[in-house]
Image (cartoon, rainbow, N blue to C red):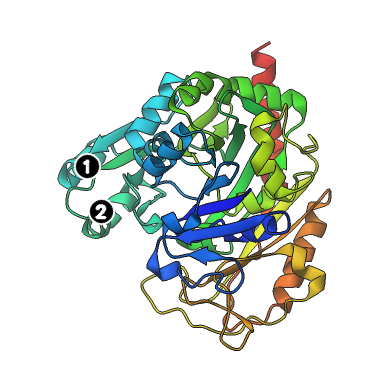
Amino acid sequence: MGLKVVSKEGDFMSMALRCMEDTDVKVYIEETLYKKAYEGIVPKVDSATGLDIKSGDVIVFDMVGAGDGADVLLKKGYNVVSGSSIADKMELDRPYGAKLMEDTHIQVPPTYEFDDFDEGKAFIEKTMKCYVFKPNGNIDLELTFVPSSPEGLLAMWRYLSSKCEKGTTFELQEKVDGVEMSTEGWFTGDHFLLPINSTMEEKKLGTGGTGQNTGCMGNVVWFWDDQTSVFLYEYLFKPLEPFLKKHGYVGPLDINGIWNDQGIWALEWTARFGYDAVQAMSRLIKGSLFQFLRDYKKMDRMPVEANPDIYSMTTRLCIPPYPYKKETVPVVPILGLTKAIKDNVYLADAMIDSDGELSTSGSDGYVMSIGEHGFDLPRIRRKIYSIMEEIDLPSKIYRTDIGERVIKQRPEIESIIRKLIKSRR
């Protein structure tokens, strides 16, 4: 029995490393750019067939896009976590994902699909509402554009259209005011486990939400108490259970949305592990991470404490030219890691070099995340940023405001949820 990981860009590697304490691990990384990641740290193979999958193995698909292969293994009875063709469709086909939300009574901001940029521009000029531009498919994150006004979107229109390949379809989604938060449940193949967790994530490169959209620069995760978890389960996840069971999905499912007094306005699915939320969430699991991945489908509830006052936070540490993948990333020593902070470090763009020393691997410049958890969020932040200062890397990049939004906006989220619970009694 072991852990076999089918990876696109090595996203699950830090989790695989932690599983090596309890089982044998093999990883296949598909993208050439990331082949050197974790060289000399985690055992890797050159092809998916080299994983030598056997009965009893836990098989992780760490990104959407390989769902057909996951389906084959699921139908053969293998223990697959987070991977299926329906997960690919939910996340990558935005119109399909939005229709599923509506069919399961999750409200979605008014959304309009186009396959012609001239028609899209004319629609904005006619309505003069503020829309979020979302290209369909697995398109670069930089092309999802959230304007502050209709005029701002129109001013960016030529640039956005020039960056999209011919034939790209896109959505214009009305911008909704409120608090952005994602909410996740773990589906066993039959039902979701309680408690439910939520994440507040910062996606932009720079402190204060400035610069390039990277997908994640840091986040804070917590599990809700049982009363709130039951509400979130019934409100968001219970209606999905027949659909997910029918299509054979097993794993985490996240609904990202804007919360206000009307409830959640769902924006997108994450039908897979979310990065770096899974690193933060894993710190709250009691016992072995591998045992959890192996056995959670048989559990009655998540092996965590249902206490919303316990936080787990991760923050990314990067070097230039991150997040620009097309530019050359330097291979440089990673200094400043000590045994005392080993448990706090989640390596990413890292390897053991020819001299036997830890260095960057030259993939994309996202070098590591630093994590900590506990009851005191300000203390957690201080611990993480003190470690950041210890790490010696040239031109290191990290946001200094991760967690601040939770401190400011968590009370508003709790107030919204209390009102929603009361209104449904």
**Regarding mark 2 in the picture, which secondary structure is present there?**
helix
Q: Is residue 160 above or below residue 338?
A: above
Instruction: Name the spot of residue 233 as percent of width and height, x first.
Output: 63, 24
Label 2 neighbourhood size at 10 Å, few (<14), some (14-19), many (20+)?
some
Residue hosting label 1: 120
Quarter of the view holding residue 400? bottom right
| Horizontal side of residue 82 vs 416, given as left or right | left
Q: Could you say which disc has been placed on residue 216 in the image? A: none
Instruction: Name the spot of residue 257 as percent of width and height, x first.
Output: 52, 37
| Horizontal side of residue 209 vs 280, given as left or right | left
The answer to whether residue 324 is visible is no
Q: Residue at x 70, y 32 (%)?
A: 414
Instruction: Name the spot of residue 65 as percent of width and height, x first.
Output: 38, 47
**Regarding mark 1 in the picture, which secondary structure is present there?**
helix
The answer to whether residue 233 is visible is yes
What amino acid does circle 1 point to?
A: Gly
Q: Residue at x 43, y 65 (%)?
A: 46
**Cβ–Cβ below 8 Å for labels 1 and 2?**
yes
Q: Residue furthest bottom?
A: 355
Give the Cα separation between the discs numbered 1 and 2: 9 Å
Looking at this view, is 27 or 179 the one in front? 27
Q: Residue at x 56, y 56 (%)?
A: 12
Quarter of the view holding residue 17? bottom right
| Horizontal side of residue 261 vs 152, given as left or right | right
Label 1 neighbourhood size at 10 Å, few (<14), some (14-19), many (20+)?
many
Which of marks 2 and 1 precedes in the sequence? 1
Image quadrant holding the C terminus, namely top right
- How many numbered discs sit on the rendered protein? 2
| Horizontal side of residue 84 vs 401, given as left or right | left
Residue hosting label 2: 157
What amino acid does circle 2 point to?
A: Trp
Q: Residue at x 40, y 55 (%)?
A: 141
